[in-house]
Amino acid sequence: MRQHVHRRLFMGAIASVAMAAAMFSTGSAVAQDKTTLRLSTPASETDQRSVALEEVFAPAVSDFATYEPHYNATLFKQGTELEAIARGNLDMSITSAQELATIFPEFSIFTAGYLHRDAEHQKKVFAADFMEPLKQKVEDELGVKLLSVMYLGRRQLNLRGDMEVMTPEDLSGVKLRMPGTDAWQFLGKALGASPVPMAFTEVYTALQTGAIDGQDNPLPTDKDAKFYEVTDQIVLTSHLVDLNYLAISKEVWDGLTPEQQETLQQAADDAAESGRQKQLALEEELVQFFKDEGLKVYEPNLEAFRSHVQEMYLNSEFSESWPEGMIDKINAL
Ligand code: KDO
């Protein structure tokens, strides 16, 4: 219900912006100058997705576009980027299924724990026929084109203290920071913890001061954001093979020539692939890094986590919005 109200309000806002744009627009294809592609992300510039975009995407589109990234949520706060694109204030973002699910509830299917098996599975799901109507809806109703799927990594629990976490019951009462949308909060609950909503850029300090007991992110992010400096252990739950979507304003996309669109699409796919390979390599090598830093790194009872999380999702209101038969199609890929 809340999501529907949110969506109505949001769509209303977009409709007025679209009207204003139609009244005052001088036509995006008129200018022969290079298109500026401003991207906003909470990620740092050393995050492998950021690196891939600068090293692979930017040079590939440089004949017709200037890529201008803004890191650490300095341009737009985490979770507000889609709205900024829809309003014409931003050109690109690295968005998430969790953010899309606040507007299109069916995207919550991709936020469910233990759904994607690995990075390859994620790629197949994004390219599957059944994704087309979802992508189209985001384009038509939000004015955002999802270009490619970016692999963030397998999310693991990263906690303060020395208690041992083997099952969801062991997380009872643990204040686990999760990003601030309903889908993220639900994942925290499904893991057995008490989720606390918080923006990514605030997590380090909250861990340092003990305002939270832990957070979850893939190992490369734990390293990049230096969370290991202010935590004591990593529990290898792999509860979400996490993805982000590289997104671009549909209006900006429509202002490009077909050749430019093709080049930009290829650049996005190549950057996603480069980032994916780097994240995967880092996941392999970082367990030892964290152990060397003095953290305890261990595997819990994975079956206990998997069955608890999956059952919570299937009995949740989220699953009511999932397109009929899609879980089976995803599993069959
Ligand atoms: C996070 O806030 O924990 C998260 O990992 C969520 C992702 O969807 C993504 O927004 C990511 O942060 C940022 O890109 C920072 O790495």
Image (cartoon, rainbow, N blue to C red):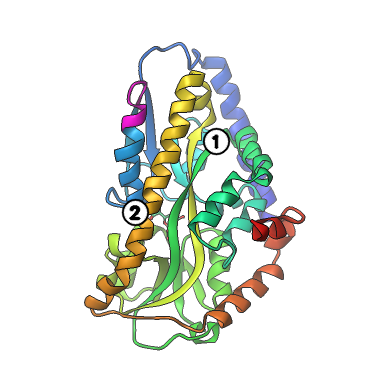
Please say if 194 is above or below 28.
below
Q: Which secondary structure lies at badge 1?
A: strand
Please say if 125 is above or below 312.
above
- In this view, the residue farthest toward the right is 324
Say which residue label 1 marks.
144
| Disc 1 to disc 2: CB gap under 8 Å | no
Please say if 255 is above or below 327.
above
Q: Amino acid at mark 1?
A: Val
Residue 112 vs residue 201, the one in the foreground = 112
Q: Amino acid at mark 2?
A: Lys
Percent position of residue 200, x then y: 38, 58
Q: Could one spot residue 90 in this view of the protein?
A: no
At a point 37% along the width and 49% down the height, the residue shown is 275
Q: Which secondary structure lies at badge 2?
A: helix
Residue 60 located within the stretch drawn in magenta? yes
Q: Quadrant of residue 110?
A: bottom right
At a point 53% along the width and 34% down the height, the residue shown is 86
Q: CA separation, marks 1 and 2?
A: 27 Å
Q: What residue span does the magenta drawing correspond to?
A: 59-65
Say which residue label 2 marks.
278
Percent position of residue 148, x then y: 50, 42
Percent position of residue 214, x then y: 39, 74
Percent position of residue 190, x then y: 58, 73
Q: Quadrant of residue 250?
A: top right
- 10 Å crowding of disc 2: few (<14), some (14-19), many (20+): some
